[in-house]
Amino acid sequence: MINLSLLSVFIPTFFLVSLTPGMCMTLSMVLGMTVGVRRALWMMAGELVGVGLVAVAAGAGVATLMLRQPELFMAFKWLGGAYLAYLGIMMWRSRGRMAIPTEPRESTSVSRTQLLTQGFVTAVANPKGWAFFIALLPPFLDASLPLASQLAILVAMILTLEFFCLLLYAGGGRTASHLLARGGSVRLLNRIAGTLMIGVGVWLALG
């Protein structure tokens, strides 16, 4: 079903790629800081669906056609980037549902749908992600073996590696939030998280 010699190179290659800081990993770290790792799992679910969609499209050759429709990406990029930047501004001002409460009586209530959408849009609206999968995934497919089974196994591995890295970043963000919160620096933490979120939004829109 799959070429084991190629697999021995595939796993470390995609693990290092997933571990590299990027839009999705930064978003995971920000949410780990603000809403916690457990709530951030909803964003991760949306992001993994998006990554899986892109990976399957790349393996099936559909991504090449998608990249020929730049207006589709522009719509996703600008709308998604503007929304993330807006959330970042609200967090920087310690306002909105995603900001860390500055008073004990306050609570965050960002919805699961919002988190799912953030993850999905960030993954799907990134042209560099499409180009990356087009360039890197096909060489690991063995033409002498069934394409569907190979693609299913490789995509499952990609999503597993991606999820592990997302958890690492979210956990790191949560640890940072605890350290800063102990010093009474909740507003500073909101500003750090907000700045990172704005950066992800700008990156998505202009990348």
Image: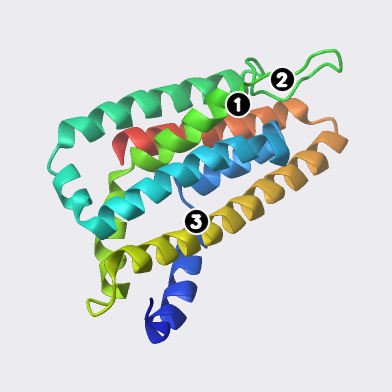
The quadrant of the image that shows the C terminus is top left
x 64%, y 51%: residue: 167
Q: Please tell me whether mark 3 sits on a helix, a strand or a loop.
A: helix
Name the side, left or right, on which 122 lies relative to 64.
Answer: right
Q: Is residue 67 visible?
A: no
User: Looking at the rendered structure, which numbered label has been put on residue 108?
Assistant: 2
**How far is mark 3 from mark 1, CA to CA?**
20 Å
Q: The residue under label 3 is which amino acid type? A: Leu
Q: Which residue is mark 1?
A: 112
Q: Is residue 68 above or below residue 93?
A: below
Q: Residues within 10 Å of mark 2 (few under 14, many from 20)?
A: some
Q: Is residue 183 above or below residue 54?
A: above
Q: Which residue is mark 3?
A: 159
Q: The residue under label 2 is which amino acid type? A: Thr
x 73%, y 43%: residue: 174
Q: Earlier in the sequence, mark 3 or mark 1?
A: 1
Q: Are marks 3 and 1 in contact (CB under 8 Å)?
A: no
**How far is mark 2 from mark 3, CA to CA?**
29 Å
Name the side, left or right, on which 91 lies relative to 157.
Answer: right
x 45%, y 67%: residue: 14
How many marks the image carries: the answer is 3
Q: Are marks 1 and 2 in contact (CB under 8 Å)?
A: no
Question: Is label 1 or label 2 in front?
Answer: 1
Q: The residue under label 1 is which amino acid type? A: Arg
